């Protein structure tokens, strides 16, 4: 690649910029600062500490081998009591913030300290702006200039040209997103001081031409926990278990960097607000998961909706880092590999969807303890993207980490300072091209019908998109756009707006060819599919001239009550707010219709809520507020109903991993569903059914076996997780005197008892494998097709059982679902088609979870762990002995006297007589055998068979499967279960192979989970 910039020495740059920069013509430059440059004193003590702490002299540049002294601005050493890069020490976010505030106080003409948000746990999220005196004095004007360059609809080319001569790019640096990656926030302590104080021409050029904005810690809650955890572990005796960083933020761990689209988290919202307010030209996020220093470009495939200018900017910025660092002999600064650049869920994509440029570093860990680095051969080779590779051995420490990333980011800042106009022009061009795209088509707008079936969620989507800066209009009268009928009140996303890039990114269909290198993350995310909404591209240009007004505040769907009468029927539309309505009125008796019906001249979908003797005055405002529609009738409709008993909900987590379970929790919190949160260890205490009606056990990761075993029991001392004088930031969500170990067999047995006694257990992803693998839901089997490749895609599912309460409110025979590779559950639905995995069982333990085709799942080579693979993945499966033990424990004191009785389930090792034989269905609702034709399930002899109800399944035809993302060998998923409901004893296990609550993006499937909760003790309902 040919580089577009010229390399000149720092002194020459400064000479050029200092005198001729347009900004100096516009605003008087402080000459005193210039004069001071030559005479600036060095902070001798700090500089000595830099040298002392550096583990290898090659990891240094002239930019960071010293620290300038200041009479007025406190150095990190003076303020915090130590130099950045001191081994064995970490700084709390609150102290970094105190320091930033002190910097702004000591140097108010060069720095401004701002609060930009509040975390879930109530901590401040902050930013510090740094620039020269004249820029800071007119900071709001500079913000405005970038605002004008953002919008070609109100800025002419001539004005833009003028602005480019005056405006300054904002270089926004963020860090502390991933709490165990500790060095970014530390380095930024020093960088801020240096940028404010240092008087070298190199730094002056940055201050004069760039506005540097720094958020040192975006995940403030996780940072404080990380620092607590580090110091706590230091005091543990050798050989004792070390405390892992349990929770970071309130809901997720490293997936806080997968929230760019969903935008649940406060940190994402804060950065989005900064983006919309300041229009940062560059967003640079600092991470630590690679060797020495990786500067982002990515292998591709790059996101299809990126402007080509952005892609070139990635490369220019990265090559500048590689060049400047390798020129100074610093080894191991490289680009290209490691990540792809495809999915827009990373925080840096907030920049991309707003036509700026996002980038990141992955630095060799800060530690903070000194150590050694011995990279593998695939990291050591000299390659075109790695001209000066890492060394086979190096002593590494926190000062190495500080030096390498502080140097590189200073070269980046200086590069942007030198190319100020280029980056402003790039930004302007991208905004212009974005608007032009809307004028030239083929997509001139997108239509979001306001009156669509899930109208409440459509309104919510409008609000969510608006919060991300997408302009949305409302049609003021009906019109036709091509073949589309637009009605007054419908929402229009105009294509001729700067941030249409966001609409392009979100509304497009992704096509990720599996021939590409392994995707780094999800491959499909199409907004309207994930949310089960109708959002239609408009290809008729006249739409732009139709009457519409801009939406300027949050919208609501039209809701309320039609008709008169004491009986209220709330229509079930699968809108997510329905569960809020139910739980906010927990004391009101509500019933669910078990079938579709007509009443009051309206057709109702099964699941519609019937309230006899309704208090209209109380309920109507609520329905209106939630955008839900109800009909008042004079008589109770003639349809079979069941009571919607409000369940007592328990929520299970596993101490070994708190990464993915938070998405369900977030939904319950947001939608107002109360629950009791506890660790799976407590399952052992038993009496679950006395306490709970529903247990939710979301995805943990790992195998059934590893989930039952929990975190390893290391050392002899207990490993507590709780708030204490030493760990004031831990123990917020949950505490334990000893987090080692998991539920164990005893806990699993209690879980089985809970279900057998009539409770409903909801499992998802990895936890959905536990019951099948332990042979507790024998007509559901787990398959592990090595050939299947489906990495975070949106797939078509087919409604196998529309009468299941889990499907209430959904219409049609299909539903888009998010699925990520596993688990592949066979509930017999794949019979006759691609049913290899469901081969007739034979031999001992058939149908009890033991694989009869072990070679079908090849040994997995232990992978190089990317940063999002914190939990070791194991292929281990429970042994037949384990299965037998759990079953015996579970049967110890339950199961007798249950309706239909388990009749004593056969012990492991037998019961497979008469393969395929299925006992009579339990009495009750006259349940026909679900999943007829099941080929895979082993018979249970004469015992009563747990009833399995396939609710949603993947299509039988693999060619029909992929909606957005990637897929190979879909035949291994054909007909398999997406959602399956198994009766065990008197209760139910609902198994979601899909991830209904994924990263706040899958609102279209939230109601599958909500229905399972609301209809927990009537999941057997089958319509009229
Ligand atoms: Zn990271």
Image: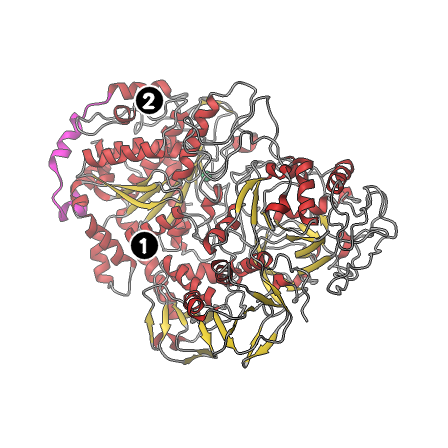
Where does the image place residue 874, in percent across and percent down from the top left? Answer: 65, 37
Q: Is residue 423 visible?
A: yes
Which image quadrant: the N terminus?
A: top left
Residue matched to label 1:
276
Total number of numbered labels? 2
Determine which quarter of the picture holds residue 102.
top left
Q: Label the magenta part by its dominant secondary structure.
A: helix
Q: Is residue 967 above or below residue 174?
A: below
Q: Outermost residue toward the front?
A: 613
- The tag on residue 506 is none
Determine which quarter of the picture holds residue 176.
top left
Which image quadrant: the C terminus?
A: bottom right
Q: Is residue 34 left or right of residue 741?
A: left
- Give the magenta-colored segment's residue range: 20-43
Where does the image place residue 46, in percent across and percent down from the top left? Answer: 28, 21
Instruction: Indicate the secondary structure of the residue bearing disc 1.
Output: helix
Q: Is residue 804 left or right of residue 437?
A: right
Where does the image place residue 981, in percent across and percent down from the top left? Answer: 67, 56
Instruction: Indicate the secondary structure of the residue bearing disc 2.
Output: helix
Q: Is residue 269 above or below residue 883?
A: below
Residue matched to label 2:
50
């Amino acid at each position: 690649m040919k580089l577009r910039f010229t390399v000149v020495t720092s002194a020459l740059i400064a000479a050029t910029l200092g005198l001729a920069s347009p900004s100096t013509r516009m605003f008087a430059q402080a000459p005193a600062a210039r004069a001071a440059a030559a005479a600036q004193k060095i902070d001798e003590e700090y500089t000595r500490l830099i040298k002392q702490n550096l583990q290898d002299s090659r990891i240094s540049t002239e930019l960071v081998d010293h620290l300038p002294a200041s009479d007025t601005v406190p150095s990190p050493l003076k303020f915090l009591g130590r130099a950045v890069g001191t081994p064995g020490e970490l700084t709390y976010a609150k102290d970094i913030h105190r320091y930033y505030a002190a910097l702004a106080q000591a140097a108010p003409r060069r720095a401004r300290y701002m609060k930009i948000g509040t975390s879930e746990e109530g901590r401040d999220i902050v930013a510090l702006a740094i620039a020269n005196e004249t820029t800071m004095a007119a900071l709001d004007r500079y913000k405005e200039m970038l605002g004008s360059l953002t919008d070609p609809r109100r800025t002419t080319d001539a004005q833009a040209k003028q602005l480019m001569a005056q405006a300054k790019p904002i270089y926004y640096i963020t860090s502390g997103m991933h709490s165990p990656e500790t060095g970014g926030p530390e380095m930024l302590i020093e960088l801020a001081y240096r940028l404010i104080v240092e008087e070298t021409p190199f730094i002056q050029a940055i201050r004069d031409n760039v506005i540097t904005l720094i958020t040192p810690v975006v995940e403030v809650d996780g940072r404080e926990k990380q620092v607590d955890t580090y110091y706590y572990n230091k005091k543990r005796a050798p050989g004792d278990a070390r405390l892992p960083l349990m929770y970071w933020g309130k809901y997720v761990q490293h997936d806080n960097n997968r929230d760019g689209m969903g935008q649940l988290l406060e940190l994402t919202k804060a950065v989005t607000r900064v983006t919309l307010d300041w229009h940062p030209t560059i967003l640079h996020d600092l991470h630590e998961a690679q060797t020495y220093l990786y500067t982002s470009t990515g292998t591709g495939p790059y996101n299809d909706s990126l402007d080509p200018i952005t892609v070139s900017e990635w490369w220019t910025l990265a090559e500048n880092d590689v060049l400047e660092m390798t020129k100074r002999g610093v080894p191991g600064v490289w680009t290209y590999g490691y990540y792809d650049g495809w999915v827009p869920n990373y925080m840096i994509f907030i920049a991309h969807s707003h036509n700026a440029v996002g980038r990141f570093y992955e630095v060799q860990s800060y530690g903070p303890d000194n150590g050694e680095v011995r990279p593998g051969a695939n990291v050591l080779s000299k390659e075109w993207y790695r001209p000066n590779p890492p060394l086979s051995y190096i002593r590494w420490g926190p000062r190495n980490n500080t030096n390498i990333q502080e140097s590189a980011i200073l070269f980046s800042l200086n590069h942007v300072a030198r190319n100020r106009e280029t980056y402003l022009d790039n930004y302007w061009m991208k905004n212009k091209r974005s608007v032009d795209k809307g004028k030239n088509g083929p997509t001139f707008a997108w239509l979001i019908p306001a009156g669509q079936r899930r109208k409440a969620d459509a309104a919510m989507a409008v609000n969510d998109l608006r919060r991300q800066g997408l302009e949305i209009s409302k049609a003021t009268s009906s019109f036709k756009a091509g073949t589309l009928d637009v009605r007054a009140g419908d929402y229009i996303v105009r294509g001729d707006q700067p941030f249409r890039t966001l609409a392009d990114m979100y509304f497009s269909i992704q096509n990720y060819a599996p021939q590409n290198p392994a995707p780094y993350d999800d491959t499909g995310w199409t907004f309207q599919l994930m949310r089960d909404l109708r959002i239609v591209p408009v290809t008729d240009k006249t739409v732009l001239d139709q009457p519409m007004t801009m939406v300027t505040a949050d919208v609501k769907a039209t809701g309320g009550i039609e008709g008169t009468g004491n009986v209220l029927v709330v229509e079930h539309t699968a809108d997510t707010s329905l569960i809020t309505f139910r739980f906010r009125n927990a004391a009101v008796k509500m019933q669910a219709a078990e079938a579709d019906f007509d009443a009051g001249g309206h057709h109702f979908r099964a699941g519609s809520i019937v309230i006899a003797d309704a208090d209209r005055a109380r309920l109507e405002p609520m329905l209106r507020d939630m955008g839900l529609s109800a009909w008042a009738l004079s008589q109770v409709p003639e349809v079979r109903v069941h009571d919607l008993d409000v369940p007592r909900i328990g929520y299970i987590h596993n101490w070994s991993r708190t990464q993915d379970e938070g998405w369900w929790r977030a939904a319950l919190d947001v939608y107002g569903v109360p629950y009791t949160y506890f660790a799976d260890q407590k399952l052992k205490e038993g009496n679950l059914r006395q306490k709970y009606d529903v247990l939710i056990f979301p995805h943990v990761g790992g195998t059934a076996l590893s989930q039952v075993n929990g975190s390893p029991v290391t050392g002899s001392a207990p490993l507590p997780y709780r708030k204490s004088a030493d760990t004031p930031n831990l123990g917020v969500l949950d505490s334990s005197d000893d987090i080692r170990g998991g539920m164990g067999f005893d806990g699993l047995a209690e879980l089985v008892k809970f279900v057998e006694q009539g409770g409903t257990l909801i499992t998802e992803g990895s936890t959905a494998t536990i019951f099948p693998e332990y042979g507790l839901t024998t007509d559901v089997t787990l398959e592990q097709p090595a050939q299947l490749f489906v990495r975070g895609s949106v797939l078509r599912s087919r409604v196998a059982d529309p009468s299941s309460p889990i499907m209430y409110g959904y219409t049609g025979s299909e539903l888009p679902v998010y699925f990520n590779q596993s688990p592949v559950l066979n509930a017999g639905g794949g019979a006759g088609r691609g049913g290899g995995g469901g081969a007739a069982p034979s031999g001992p333990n058939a149908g009890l979870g033991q694989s009869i085709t072990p070679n079908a799942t090849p040994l997995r080579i232990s992978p190089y762990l990317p940063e999002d693979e914190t939990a070791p993945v194991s292929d281990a499966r429970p042994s037949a002995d384990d299965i037998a033990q759990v079953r015996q424990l579970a049967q110890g004191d339950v199961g007798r006297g249950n309706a239909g009785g388990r009749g004593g389930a056969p012990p492991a090792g037998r019961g497979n007589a008469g393969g395929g034989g299925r006992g009579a269905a339990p009495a009750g609702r006259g349940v026909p055998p679900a999943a007829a034709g099941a080929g895979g399930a082993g018979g249970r002899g004469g015992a009563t068979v747990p009833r399995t109800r396939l609710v949603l399944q993947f299509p039988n035809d693999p060619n029909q499967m992929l909606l957005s993302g990637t897929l190979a060998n879909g035949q291994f998923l054909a007909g398999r279960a997406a959602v399956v409901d198994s009766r065990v004893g008197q209760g139910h296990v609902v198994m979601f192979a899909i991830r209904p609550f994924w990263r706040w993006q899958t609102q279209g499937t939230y109601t599958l989970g909500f229905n399972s909760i609301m209809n927990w003790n009537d999941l057997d309902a089958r319509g009229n």
